[in-house]
Image (cartoon, rainbow, N blue to C red):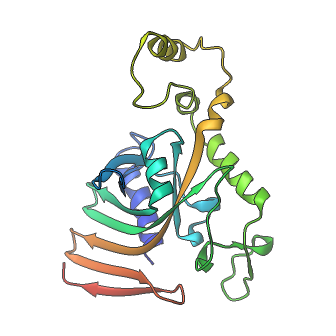
Amino acid sequence: MWQFSLQQCIQDELHKTGNVPPYTTFQLATIDTDSGYPSNRTVVFRGWLFDNIDTSVITFTTDKRMQKYQELLKNDKFEAVFYFPHLKKQFRLRGRAQIIDEDHKPILSGFAQSFIPRNNSFDSLTISYVSPSGDQWKDEIQRQWNNLSKNMKKSFIKPPPKEGLNGNNAKLISSIHRGVDGKHEDYGMKNFAVIGLFVEYVDYCDLDKDRRYIYQLDENQQWNEDEVCP
């Protein structure tokens, strides 16, 4: 299905670029309900929810003080685009984005594919599913935080994004860059959140082979694939 095609493209593109940079970015569009305009930005792919591609849930991380966090609290609809220039492949995805932090946990009703298998068994013939517990969500947030670089963790200590650059803010940013801010790197975790993209629709275009596929979730939470004209 599309999840494994996307994961393969991520790996192949990184190989083509020699892992420079050593991560994959994609474009995320949300809705600013105050202005009515769409909001678009580049975010970093942080893998799959619970480090399990079978969830079909793409993750990235954000500062809770950023605009997209507030936008998703009001309207969780999103569209995302992965484009792989060396492979000439593109994925457009849309669905609902769920905030994951100490105050918010995804509503998994209707998302059977996002449940965690008991006993870490991934045999699709014998698997039984349970909804994640509070501790499992906490562990996932911690796992995502631990995977960030030291410099990225420090970014969560900076002044609120888009706040005026006054003398105090400039001084704090300078001290963070010089590593003399006096704050432990985990101090910024209070501003940290994980976002899970619960995908419902995928438009996959292979430009090199001139092929195009549409994937959609049906009412039974099963993926349906249709090849369409490119």
Image point 21% across, 68% down: which residue?
208
- Tell me: 117 left or right of 215: right
Q: Quadrant of residue 113?
A: bottom right
Residue 215 locus on image (x, y percent): 38, 80
Image point 71% across, 57% down: which residue?
137
Q: Quadrant of the N terminus?
A: bottom left
Tell me if residue 75 comes above or below residue 15 in the rendering: below
Tell me if residue 203 comes above or below residue 101 in the rendering: below
Image point 62% across, 79% down: which residue?
112
- Tell me: 229 left or right of 154: left
- Tell me: 77 left or right of 159: left
Residue 150 locus on image (x, y percent): 59, 29
**How many numbered discs, if any?**
0
Q: Quadrant of residue 181?
A: top right
Residue 178 locus on image (x, y percent): 52, 12
Q: Quadrant of residue 148?
A: top right
- Tell me: 61 left or right of 11: right
Q: Quadrant of the C terminus?
A: bottom left
Image point 39% across, 18% down: which residue?
165
Which of the two residues, 110 or 81, is positioned nearer the viewer here? Answer: 110
Residue 73 locus on image (x, y percent): 51, 55
